[in-house]
Amino acid sequence: MNVHSTESYKPPENRAELERRYAAGERYFPETDLSGESLVGIKLDGADFEKHSWFFDADFSGASLRGVSFRECNLKCANFSAADLTGAILELAAIESIKTTGAKLEAVKVHGASFYGCELTENDELPSWDW
């Protein structure tokens, strides 16, 4: 994990900036707010959005998110249809009303996440819906 001083770090403000910084090798993006953003097909394998990032109503359809940390993030109403979330970390995240139709969800960690007001345990599987 990269460490940023609070004075110099600024989270990406849109998809283009996120992709540019990811392509340059950056992987640590705390406090990112891309709510409502179209992130369809984006590749962010190994990215770390841990702590206070917001993706409310973001569209990650078909995205590659292998090993991404969304720990303590807001993912309410996000669309992960056909996304690859293999090994993703959703611990302590707000993951209410997400779409996961056709998503790869192997080894997703959800310990402590709130899901429709429930607590999921380490071995629970993330459900998939057809909406």
Image (tube, rainbow, N blue to C red):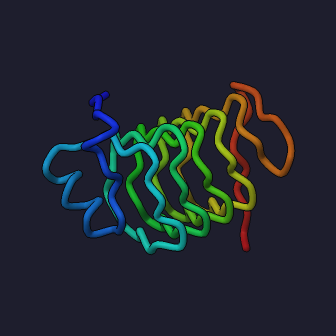
Up-down: is 33 above or below 16?
Answer: above
Quadrant placement of the N terminus:
top left
Q: For the view shown, which residue lies furthest in the right direction?
A: 117
- Between 18 and 78, the residue placed more toward the observer is 18
Q: Residue at x 48, y 59 (%)?
A: 33
List the single residue furthest toward the left. 24
- Camera-side residue of 20 and 4: 4
What residue is drawn where x is 74% and y is 33%?
124
Apparent side of residue 17 relative to residue 88 in the rendered image (left or right):
left
Q: Residue at x 86, y 46 (%)?
A: 117
In the depicted view, which residue is nearer to us: 68 or 84?
A: 68
Q: How many marks?
A: 0
Point out the image quarter for the C terminus: bottom right
Which quarter of the picture shows residue 125?
Answer: top right
From the top left corner, tell me how far across and down residue 27 is, in percent: 28, 41
Q: Viewed as shown, does residue 12 lie left or right of 88?
A: left
> Which residue occupies 81% across, 35% down?
119
Left or right position of 40 against 52: left
Q: Quadrant of residue 75?
A: bottom right
Q: Where is residue 31 in the image (x, y as percent from the top left)?
A: 46, 48
* Quadrant position of residue 110: top right
Residue 103: % across, % down: 55, 56
